[in-house]
Structures are given as C-alpha cells and as structure tokens.
Image: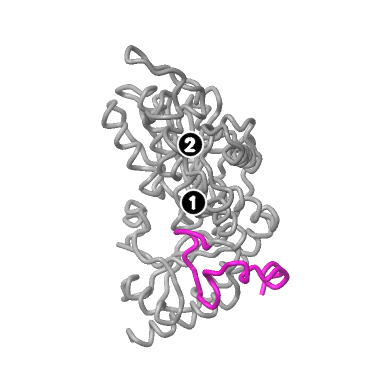
Amino acid sequence: MTDLAQGLRLRDDFPGVGDWHYLDSAATAQKPRAVIDAIARAYGADYATVHRGVYERSANMTLAYEAARRKVAQFIGAASDAEIVYVRGATEGINLVAQSWAGTQLKAGDRILLSTLEHHSNIVPWQIVAERVGAQIDVVPLMRDGCIDLDAMAAMITPAHKMVALAHVSNVLGSVLDCRRAADIAHGAGAKILIDGCQAVPRLAVNVAALDCDFYVFSAHKLYGPTGIGVLWARQDLLDVMPPYQGGGSMIDKVTFEKTTYAPAPTRFEAGTPHITGVVGLSAAIDYVQTIGLDAIHAHECALVGQARAALEALNSVRVFGPGDSAGILSFEVEGVHPHDVGTILDEGGVAIRAGHHCAQPLMRHLGVEATARASFGLYSDDSDVDALVQGLARVRKIFG
C-alpha cells in the first residue's frame, strides 16, 4: 500500500466507494464527502441566485461563486480570473472555442491539426467548423509507445495551420503530452493551441502560463467534483475578440430591439442562470485535492498503475496498451474475449472497469481493435483494487479457457 493510501485513509472519505473496486475514474471520479456536503449546503441553507439579488443571501452566494473563479484561476496558473469561463464541461469548452474563435478566424484553405489519440470531443467540433468554413484537418501520428509524435508534428505543421488541439493526457492510453513543446511548435507556425486537460487536471499540476497554450479545458466531475460544470481558460486577448457562444440573460450589456451589446469576457460566454451549486462543488473539489497535493496523488496512481501493468503483462493472454509511465490509466485486451464480456465478469466480482471504444474510435482503429478494457485509478484506489482486478482476469481466463 502506498504512503498516501496508508497514511490518509482517503478511501474512507468517499461514501460511494467502500468495498467496491472502482476502476473507472477516467470516466468520472467518485466524490469525497467534503464535496457532497458543500453541494448540499449550497442547495440548502445557502441557496440563492447570483449576480441578481439585492438581498444578503444572494450577495453571499455571488461572493462564493466569484471566489471559486479566482480559485480556479490560481489552481491552473491563470493570469486573471477574467480568463476563466464556466462551461458545462470540457466538451462545451471545446465547442465554444471551435465556434467562437475558429469559426470566426479560420477561412477556406486553412488547416487544423489534431492527433490520432483524441477523444471525439476534440475531433467532432473541429470537423463541424472545418466543414462550415472550408478548412482541412490533419492528424499527427503516434509513436510506438502511444505518445503523440511531436517530431512528426514539427515536420508536418505549416503556416496554413491556424489551430492545434491536443490532449494533455490520453483518456485511453494515459500517455502524457509535452505541452510546452507542442505549444512551441504550434506558435512557431503561427497557430493557436488548445489543450484538453480532462485527464491531466485530476493528477498533474497544471500551469497554463508555463505550458504557454492559448486555450485549456477541463471538467469538474473528473476532478472529484460534480457533473455539469467545467472550465475554459483562454488568453484574455483571445476572449476579447470572440463573439458570444449563446445569447440570453446575464451575458448582455444593453438590449434593445435595434441592437444588443454584450458584456465583457468571461460574462459574455455565460448566458442564463449558471450552475451555481456546481461551481460551489468545483471549489470544494479543488480544496480537497490541494490539501492532499497533486504530486502525492500522481505518485500514488503511478505506483498502482505500475503494479497493475506488471501483473497484467505477466499474463500471456493479456495485451497492454500505452507507455510504461502512463498517468492513472491502463488499457488492455484479453485474447479472444470481448472487452464487454471482460467488464461483465469483473463486475460480478465487484470490480468496475470501462469497456468499449472510450469515445476514441480513430485510436481504436490505430490500435487494431474495436474496443479495449480500461482500468483507471483515482486517489482513493489502493492495492486491493489491483488484486481484485488480477483475480477477476484469472476468472475471465478460466471461463473462456
């Protein structure tokens, strides 16, 4: 058992875990009691709208809501909380950039650069805008270990490439991108770069200034927070030239039937009543993670992935995907057994994994499979989860011969 698991007994903080061997944290993380309690208070004794009420409780909730924005900015090293846009999740954040930046800045003949391992949420929005404006999409290949080939990226990027969008950590392979080098390559060609940080933020310390990216997105529910809330960070100068993504209340300056003017960023991108309690939950999740420390969380998860990888590689019928230093995620296949059957049998033994294409069908084709099984770890995971996974796979092999 790692020092983190043994010393802090973090599993006890998560009422949804208990004796369950939950190995699907890359899909969504379980929630600590501190986050659940913060959301309950926000829906209970503290509940009120924000930015509108003149009464005390509304003023207090508005203060908490905006304090959370400042906390997010500090958490990812943003220069200002004015660069933090609340969105429903990373998917909406990417769509917002695709529509409001790429959709207004790109023209026919321009190019967008993605990679083979991207989640569908970092592919489809770019396809939609490319089709609309007449741009083309190019794809950076992977190296043998599953990492994005940045040498190939440097060789293939041209001044026609205006947008680059890459995952910080692969949701299938756990491979970690050298974001700063990718940003240097993109900027050297005059392109902007968006980083999908969904799988990075729960386990890696992120500083957007040091990464030198232009846009960064993540979802709260993978960071031990609630669903339905996420963050788009963008450089202030980029936000300032982006038109609204949606229209409605809050995002306006003045409305007349002749003309409407809009609020400055980030308010311009936050139409309607926001997910107030979601923001409160995100704030509590950041507090919880920072109390433990991202370096400690990452080391803990790496130790568990290393144990699991070694155990699975010792099984002749199991093929493991991704680099040896994958971050919190381990994908694999059992020879002759569909991943859905693997997942079903493991579930009978109280082990929850993900089975399928993981919203990464192009990557599946690259790997030569239709689907994989994926075990993904969180700060509450421990040795018992690895043991249960290995024992469950032994049962799979026994059933299927």
Comparing 137 with 353, the one in front is 353
**385 relative to 370 in the view: left or right:** right
Measuring 58% from the left and 69% from the top, which residue is drawn there? 381
Q: Amino acid at mark 2?
A: Leu
Comparing 199 with 266, the one in front is 266
Q: Amino acid at mark 1?
A: Cys
Mark earlier in primary sequence (1, 2) = 1
Q: Is-magenta flag for residue 18?
A: yes
Residue under label 2 = 194
In the picture shown, does residue 316 fall above or below 113? Answer: below
In the picture shown, does residue 226 fall above or below 96? Answer: below
Q: Is residue 360 visible?
A: yes
Q: Nearer the viewer, mark 1 or mark 2?
A: 2
Comparing 101 with 333, the one in front is 101
Mark 1 crowd level (few <14, some 14–19, many ≥20, 10 Å Cα):
many
Measuring 42% from the left and 38% from the top, which residue is drawn there? 94
Secondary structure, mark 2, is strand
Measuring 44% from the left and 44% from the top, which residue is drawn there? 88
Mark 2 crowd level (few <14, some 14–19, many ≥20, 10 Å Cα):
many
Q: Quadrant of residue 371?
A: bottom left
Marks 1 and 2, how far apart in space?
A: 17 Å
Quadrant the N terminus occupies: bottom right
Please name the colour scheme applied to the rendered image: one colour
Secondary structure, mark 1, is loop
Residue under label 1 = 147
The picture places residue 50, in percent across and down from the top left corner, at 53, 37
Which portion, as a residue range, is magenta? 1-30
Q: Is-magenta flag for residue 141?
A: no
Q: Residue furthest top?
A: 258
